[in-house]
Amino acid sequence: MSKWLLVVLVLGTSARAVAAPSPPTSSSGDQVPPPPATPQPGAAEPAADAPTLADLGWPGDTVRVEVTHVAAHVVATPSRRGRPLGKVMRGTRAELGALARGDRRCPYWVELRPRGWLCARDVAPTTAPVGGEVFPLVRPGAILPGEYYDVGAAGATAFPGRKALAAGSPSKALTTGVMVRGKGRVTVGDVTYVHTNKGLIDASALRRLAPSTWVGLDLRATPAPSWPFAFAVGPRRGSALIVRASPDAKAAVVRRLQRREQVAVVEVGEQFLRLGDGQWLARADARLVEQVPPPPGLGADEAWIDIDLDQQTLVAYQGVTPVYVTLVSTAIRRKGTPPGLYRIRAKAATTRMASEADEKLYDVGEVPWAMRFRAGLYLHAAYWHDGFGSKRSHGCVNLSPRDARALYEWAGPPAPPGWSEVEQELPAGVLIRIRDATTPAPPAYDYGRERKQAPPIPN
């Protein structure tokens, strides 16, 4: 998506909470320890003016709370201007920590264990065990968390609900360029409507999107054919992908490759790659993948990601060991995905991405497995195209849904059960190096250029 996106984090679908799963594991297989509890000066001994459970109207033996808001904002300190930590979804249950007084907009705050504060009006006491869902919710065997559609050329009308539909009171008119997530269907009279994140929409005005089934190589399970190697991807969809007998565009045809087929490379030339004796593939028909050293200063086993804009490839590393390789789609415009050293600042189970007024209209709903590394720029699943290995985006790094999910689950910080979003404070966060031939060793991005203080939590 565009460098100048208006990005609005979308509330995930609420769901019944379940018992907490076993502790997550890191990419090395070790258990990931839970995040440390936020130290609070009054946690062990309440401050003199600290509220009591009775002030909240709760039973005196309350030790756990359940989130009642559809998606509640979690902050580091009991204030609406506290540093954002993420969002936790309705139905999630957690241990209760300290209590604190607030202001008129939020009279009382409650501490969640192991971290964070919520406005007390977003939770209720519970005796049920601690637990929460893992977001986004994906049915077994499915690629995406639901069905996705785009609005046809004739546009569409969205209604907030059945009452508005019966009254003929639409909430908005949608144009082409809008994509929505479907959450079931309902028939009213002889018309079938799709429940979407925009409301009820006539199914005939929507086109269902078929997500890409492409997935890269998880090198922990499937070794690379060799290093270096290449994916066969031509400059256009349907390119011939011909292996020739010599490094000449007119040489005899030896064989033809399938789209995105992986091939070992034994020699790298300026115009051709040698795959073996008498086997040459044009560089224009290949996306070369080579191992590269990590940027200076990384820990010996630190996780990081390398993105090659020229080759449209991504390699995830654990130290010097590559663990995942795939094809991506970055910006069509050269400066749309700027080279640099970045950190993953936030992860969102789903997010909305929309254009600004001076851009071609697009409004892409509930984009799954999104990881923000710069204001307006994410690694995320793209459910609307299958052009991975070629430049397609406005600025974000597009991944196939299966790749996006794998990398989201691999990259820290882990999202606790029930959390749909997590924020990461610098200098932590998985490092991302985005480079090209003109900027092979890009500088670290200056996050001081971005707004340092988050806006107050919306009312």
Image (tube, rainbow, N blue to C red):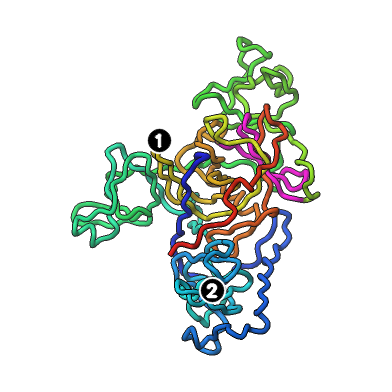
Q: Quadrant of the C terminus?
A: bottom left
Q: Residues within 10 Å of mark 1 (few under 14, many from 20)?
A: few
**CA–CA distance between discs 2 and 1?**
42 Å
Give the residue at mark 2. Answer: 93
Amino acid type indicated by mark 1: Lys
Amino acid type indicated by mark 2: Arg
**Percent x, y for residue 126?**
50, 81
**Percent x, y for residue 183?**
38, 56
Please tell me which residue lies in front, 177 or 15.
Answer: 177
**Which tag is nearer the camera, tag 2 or tag 1?**
1
Q: Tell me what residue is drawn at x 37 percent, y 40 percent.
A: 177
For residue 326, which quarter of the picture? top right
Q: Tell me what residue is drawn at x 45 percent, y 51 percent.
A: 366
For residue 33, which quarter of the picture? bottom right
Eyeballing the image, is 251 above or below 159?
above
Horizontal side of residue 286 vs 268, given as left or right: left
- Element on which disc 2 rests: strand
Give the residue at mark 1. Answer: 360
Secondary structure predominantly adopted by residues drawn in magenta: strand
Eyeballing the image, is 234 above or below 380?
above
Residue interval drawn in magenta = 302-329
**Percent x, y for residue 402?**
55, 47
Number of marks in the image?
2
Please tell me which residue lies in front, 346 or 209.
Answer: 346
| Residue 324 can be seen in this image | no
